[in-house]
Amino acid sequence: MNRAAAFLLLATIGCRQSEGSYQGYANRTAAIGDSALATVTSYLTLDSTAAVRYDSSAAARLERLSTRFGGIMRPDTVAVFHRQMLEGLDSLVLAMRVLRDRETSCNQERTIDCVDTRDFNYILSSIHSGVRIYLDARRRLRETMRSLGATFPDPPPVSPSALTSRAPARPPS
């Protein structure tokens, strides 16, 4: 009888910890992922004719948070959505790196590699795509977490019109 009682006690504690761990996972995922996303929201309002400038502090924060986000993945039913969210954040990191590399080349007077208006649309489109991938996967993760009994906070406010790709700027004739 003692073994059965001990097993029942351990099983009960394990189930309670599992429920709590989903909520803890939901809280960490939302906080870290949404903070990473917030570092690039200023780029969402730019169009391809605007000057797109590299923000080193935003890029460093984005990379740090994206790495941290990848480290909290769970090996279960929500992993596929977490990977998709991470893919979106990785797209943002790469877009920021391209922008940094282009500005660095320009500052070093290697003008063939300078950012010009032809590059802005591609860089901004990559940022928009990364945000869309992240938010779509986040929505699906939120639905799954809800079915597992965990609450998931609302996503950060991003205007749907800010996520639409803009037409590339035409070079002057």
Image (cartoon, rainbow, N blue to C red):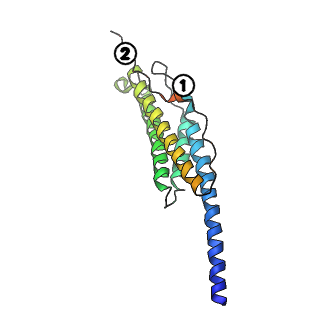
Left or right: 24 as drawn, with respect to 136: right
Circle 1: residue type: Thr
Q: Can residue 104 be seen in this view?
A: no
Quarter where residue 129 is shown = top left
Q: Quadrant of the rendered structure where residue 55 is?
A: top right
Vertical order, 69 against 165 (above or below): below
Q: In this orientation, does residue 162 appear? A: yes
- Judged from the image, the secondary structure of the residue bearing numbered disc 2 is loop
Residue 110: where, in percent of width, then height?
A: 37, 26
- C-alpha span from label 2 to label 1: 19 Å
The quarter in which the C terminus is drawn is: top left
Q: Which amino acid does label 2 sit on?
A: Arg
Q: Relative to the observer, which residue lies in front, 75 or 42?
A: 75
Read off the residue under disc 1. Answer: 45
Q: How crowded is mark 1: few (under 14 residues within 10 Å), some or many (20 or more)?
A: few
Mark 2 Cα shell of 10 Å, populated few (<14), some (14-19), many (≥20): few
| Closer-to-camera residue (118/21) | 21
Residue lying farthest bottom? Answer: 1
Check disc 2 and report the residue beneath it. 170
Q: Where's residue 92, x and y in %?
A: 48, 38
Q: In which quarter of the image is residue 15?
A: bottom right
Picture coordinates of residue 134, whole percent (x, y): 50, 42
- Towards the viewer: 147 or 51: 147
- Decide if residue 101 is on the left or right side of residue 78: left
The quadrant of the rendering that contains the N terminus is bottom right
Q: Which mark is on residue 133?
A: none
Q: In the rendering, at what x and y percent does residue 2 appear?
A: 67, 89
Q: Earlier in the sequence, mark 2 or mark 1?
A: 1
Find numbered disc 1 in the image and state the secondary structure of the residue it sits on.
helix
Say whether marks 2 and 1 touch (CB < 8 Å): no
Query: Vertical placement of 93 versus 103: above or below?
Result: below
